[in-house]
Image (spheres, rainbow, N blue to C red):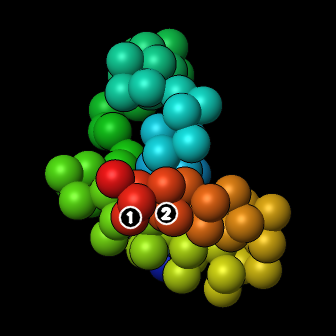
Amino acid sequence: MDFLEGLEEHNTAMDNAYAVVTNKKDLDALYKELNENDKDYFSLPFNFSDTSSVISILLDHYDALEDFEKCNKLKTILQDVQRN
């Protein structure tokens, strides 16, 4: 795997995590896509047992990409998680 492939896989993992955190997809939907696209890997960057840290990692990622719309959505979700 070269640098660009690794970067693409990293971004895919972050996008998958964002979709799960924002309830746009669940893990079953991601698994279905995996099978439909004949991929042999499942890209997620981390364990979802600590939601706050997952969201913080995603915030750092999307902030670096200057995707402020996703950052705002994640900040709202993080505030809700921290309240509960």
Q: Quadrant of the N terminus?
A: bottom left
Q: Secondary structure at mark 1?
A: helix
Asked whether residue 2 is in view, the answer is: no
Where is residue 75, by image quadrant?
Answer: bottom right
Question: Going 54% across and 81% down the picture, which residue do you hit?
Answer: 60
Residue occupying image coordinates x 54% and y 33%: 23
Q: Which residue is mark 1?
A: 82
Do the residues bearing badges 2 and 1 touch, measured as CB atoms within 8 Å? yes
- Disc nearest the viewer among 2 and 1: 1
Amino acid type at mark 2: Leu
Residue 78 numbered tag? 2
Q: Residue 67 lies in what quarter of the image?
A: bottom right
Tell me if I can see residue 29 in this picture. yes
Task: Count the labels in the image.
Answer: 2
**Location of residue 40 (image quadrant):** top left
Depicted 5 relative to depicted 2: above or below: above
**Horizontal side, residue 17 vs residue 66: left or right:** left
